[in-house]
Structure formats: structure tokens, C-alpha cells
């Protein structure tokens, strides 16, 4: 038995709603029979409870319709984010060793693109430092990109990310 209403299908939700409404109607009928409320008031209470339930159903349908619009928008934004060059580099580099990364960086002819590749690798939390020639180190923005192994060993294990506002 599934006790979580969030996991119910439409038929289960409607059955539960009808069950609650029938108990309310029964309670109103008993109250009218005992003379606690008039039959006119009992009819009004029953109608109002029914309207409330129908309103809840309409709200849920509206939320479902809104989700049908927002979910594809969210997934398209996530897809665009993962298709960005830096995210693709991070995904590829996670499975590469240091010599393979070096070969990949050397294969990039454009210095600007090479600097982007090196910055993307340096931004990965697993990377402590990247030792490159001075010419490349001056073109990169990451504090993890250094010129000598001595500079690399002086870096802390985790370099705080540089936050830029634009």
C-alpha cells in the first residue's frame, strides 16, 4: 500500500478526495439530523466543501501545466550549460592522466584556446597545480598555473576559486 499522496496517480487522488467529501457530507447530514444546523445551511456547507475540492483540483492541474512548460526550459538550460567548452573539457579531463592532458594542450595551436583549456583543467578541484612554461603561465588566469615545480609545491592543497562579477 502506498501511503505517500505525492506518489498517487490521478485515480487514487480522486478516490481519496471523494472519500473525504463523503465523510464531510455524512457529518453535515448528521449535524442537520440532530438539529445542530438547518437543512439549508447543511446544503450550503456541502456545496462549499465541494467547491473547495474542485478548486484544489484546478490548482493542481495548473501546477502540472506549469511544470509541463518549465521542465523543458530547465532541461534545455542544463543542456546548454553542459555543452559549454569548459564543461566539456572538465568532463573529458576527469578521465585523463597528466601526460594525456599535456598532449591535448600541446595539440591546441591557438594560444588563447590553449589558455582556456589550461584554465578549465586548473579549475577542477582535484588539480593542485599545473606547471607550464613562463609564456603559457602569463596567458592564464588561474593561480594554480605556475612556472616552476617549487611554486607548485608551495600552493595549498585547495586554492579558493576566484570570484569575478560581471
Image: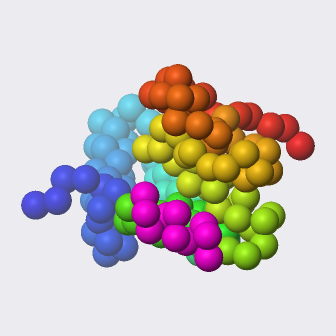
Question: Left or right: where does residue 74 sit relative to residue 46?
Answer: right
Q: What are the residue bounds of the magenta stretch?
A: 98-107
Q: How is the image coloured?
A: rainbow
Q: Is residue 32 above or below residue 50?
A: above
Which image quadrant is residue 7 in?
bottom left
Quadrant of the image containing the C terminus: top right
Q: Is residue 138 above or below residue 84?
A: above
Q: Is residue 125 above or below residue 88?
A: above
Q: Tell me if residue 105 is in the magenta stretch.
A: yes
Q: Is residue 149 visible?
A: yes
In the image as oriented, which residue stretches furthest toward the left?
Answer: 1
Nearer to me, 133 or 50? 133
> Which residue is found at the position 80% from the left and 37% from the top?
164
Which image quadrant is residue 34 in?
top left
Q: Is residue 153 above or below residue 135?
A: above
**Figure label count:** 0
Spot occupied by residue 54 in the image (x, y as percentages of width and height): 53, 63
> Which residue is found at the position 56% from the left and 54% from the top?
121
Spot occupied by residue 8 in the image (x, y as percentages of width and height): 29, 65
Nearer to me, 142 or 59? 142
Spot occupied by residue 108 in the image (x, y as percentages of width and height): 67, 74
> Which residue is found at the position 43% from the left and 44% from the top?
126
Q: Is residue 17 visible?
A: no
Question: Left or right: where does residue 8 sit relative to residue 2?
Answer: right
Nearer to me, 108 or 23? 108
In the image as oriented, which residue stretches furthest toward the right?
Answer: 166
Quadrant of the image containing the N terminus: bottom left
Spot occupied by residue 57 in the image (x, y as percentages of width and height): 51, 64
Dominant SS type (magenta)? helix
Nearer to me, 31 or 144? 144
Q: Tell me if residue 1 is in the magenta stretch.
A: no
> Which residue is found at the position 67% from the left and 35% from the top?
143
Amino acid at each position: 500500500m502506498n501511503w505517500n499522496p505525492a506518489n498517487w496517480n490521478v485515480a487514487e487522488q480522486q478516490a481519496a478526495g471523494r472519500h473525504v467529501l463523503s465523510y464531510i457530507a455524512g457529518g453535515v447530514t448528521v449535524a442537520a439530523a440532530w438539529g445542530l444546523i438547518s437543512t439549508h445551511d447543511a446544503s450550503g456547507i456541502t456545496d462549499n466543501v465541494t467547491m473547495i475540492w474542485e478548486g484544489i483540483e484546478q490548482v493542481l492541474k495548473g501546477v502540472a501545466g506549469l511544470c509541463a512548460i518549465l521542465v523543458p526550459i530547465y532541461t534545455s538550460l542544463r543542456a546548454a550549460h553542459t555543452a559549454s567548452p569548459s564543461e566539456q573539457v572538465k568532463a573529458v579531463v576527469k578521465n585523463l592522466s597528466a601526460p594525456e592532458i599535456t598532449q591535448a594542450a600541446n595539440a591546441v595551436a591557438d594560444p588563447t584556446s590553449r589558455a582556456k583549456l589550461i584554465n578549465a583543467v586548473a579549475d577542477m578541484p582535484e588539480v593542485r597545480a599545473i606547471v607550464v612554461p613562463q609564456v603559457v603561465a602569463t596567458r592564464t588566469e588561474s593561480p594554480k598555473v605556475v612556472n616552476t615545480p617549487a611554486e607548485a609545491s608551495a600552493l595549498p592543497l585547495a586554492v579558493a576559486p576566484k570570484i569575478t562579477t560581471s
